[in-house]
Amino acid sequence: MARRRVESVSGSLIELADWPPQGLSETEAEVDGERLSLVLLREGGVLKAWLNVCPHAGRRLDWAPGRFLVDKGRLVCAAHGASFELEHGECVAGPCKGASLVPVRVAVAGAG
């Protein structure tokens, strides 16, 4: 599968009130015409998103839909144990060290 950098979620807005005030969640959105799973990180009024795909083997990061392993503030891939810092999504430990999660720009409805 060819890797691509995703710049935005096409035609999708996320209602910030729909997500817990802190922590990781999962949702699906249309990206380049394809329905894909996203990891969402909310920290108060800030929402970040990445494709829910580990760069090591292309598997989902969650151990069950929307359920993520977090250790010492890092997202841990349930399949192979790769650890990702949550500032930029970079893998800092495990089989894909140095690779990064694919970021997805999200528009928050009612922001600003």
Image (cartoon, grey):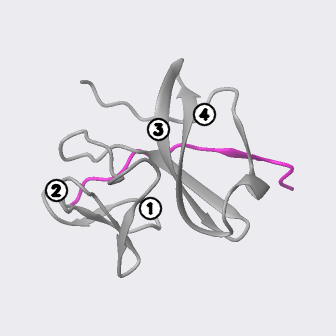
Q: Residue at the far top: name it.
A: 33
Q: Name the residue type under label 1.
A: His
Which class describes the residues within 10 Å of circle 3: few (<14), some (14-19), or many (20+)?
some
- As drawn, 50 above or below 81: above
Instruction: Find the distance from the CA under tag 4 to the CA under tag 3.
Output: 11 Å
Q: Which residues are magenta?
A: 98-112
Instruction: Give residue 10's position: percent from left, percent from top.
Output: 63, 27
Identify the element where label 3 is drawn: strand
- As drawn, 105 above or below 100: above
Q: Nearer the viewer, mark 2 or mark 1?
A: 2
Disc 3 + disc 1, Cβ < 8 Å: no
Mark 3 vs mark 1: which is more N-terminal? 3
Disc marking residue 88: 1
- Residue situated in front as seen by the camera: 70 or 56: 70
Residue designated by label 2 = 80
Instruction: Find the distance from the CA under tag 2 to the CA under tag 4.
Output: 27 Å
Identify the element where label 2 is drawn: loop
Q: Nearer the viewer, mark 2 or mark 4?
A: 2
Disc 2 + disc 3, Cβ < 8 Å: no
Instruction: Find the distance from the CA under tag 2 to the CA under tag 1.
Output: 20 Å
Horizontal side, residue 55 vs residue 49: left or right: left
Q: Name the residue type under label 3.
A: Ser
Residue designated by label 3 = 37
Residue designated by label 4 = 9
Which class describes the residues within 10 Å of circle 4: few (<14), some (14-19), or many (20+)?
many
